[in-house]
């Protein structure tokens, strides 16, 4: 286990608020990465995807880099523009 992982593990034990905020931040980061990977796998640039979604390239960048508070309707449009469907699971 790396030093940073050890630190995070210990900090999460000591500080429940940190643990909660860290987990939320990690999930938002992970969502942005998944969206970027899906776009890249579809062979589209941010500009091309933005055109398909009738929005600006900066909006696509914001979605991929700051996925917090993204609307389900926006996720659906994003997926649809990639020729994919959106599946939501509560686990």
Image: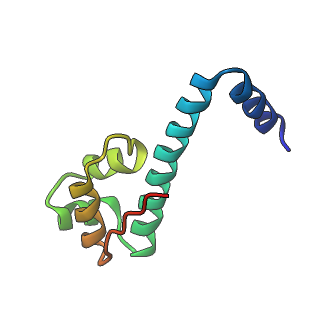
Horizontally, residue 38 falls left or right of residue 86, namely: right
**Residue 78 placement (x, y as % from top left):** 28, 63
What residue do we see at 35% from left, 70% from top?
44
Q: Residue furthest bottom?
A: 83
Q: Position of residue 26 (x, y in %)?
A: 55, 42
> Which residue appears at 83% of the width and 34% of the height?
3
- Foreground: 2 or 46? 2
- Whether 69 is drawn above or below 75: the answer is above
Q: Against 70, is 25 above or below?
A: above
**Residue closer to the observer: 83 or 55:** 83
- How many labels were placed on the picture? 0
x and y, in percent, of residue 77 in the image:
22, 64
Judge from the rendering whether residue 74 lies leftward or rightward of residue 64; answer left or right: left
Question: What residue do we see at 30% from left, 52% from top?
Answer: 60
Q: Quadrant of the N terminus?
A: top right
**The furthest residue to the left:** 54
User: Which of the 4 image quadrants contains residue 43?
Assistant: bottom left
| Coloring basis for residues | rainbow
Res 81 quadrant in image? bottom left
The structure residue drawn at horizontal position 32% and vertical position 76%, both measured from the top left corner, is: 84
Q: Position of residue 68 (x, y in %)?
A: 37, 41
Residue 44 versus residue 75 in the image, above or below: below
| Side (left or right) of 66 relative to 24 | left
């Amino acid at each position: 286990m790396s030093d940073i992982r050890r630190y995070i593990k210990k900090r999460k034990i000591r500080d429940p608020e940190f643990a909660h905020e860290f987990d939320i931040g990690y999930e938002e980061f992970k969502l942005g990465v998944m969206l970027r990977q899906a776009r890249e796998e579809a062979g589209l640039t941010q500009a091309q995807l933005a055109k398909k979604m009738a929005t600006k390239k900066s909006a696509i960048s914001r979605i991929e880099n700051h996925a917090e508070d993204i609307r389900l309707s926006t996720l659906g449009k994003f997926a649809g523009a990639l020729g994919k469907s959106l599946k939501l699971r509560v686990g």
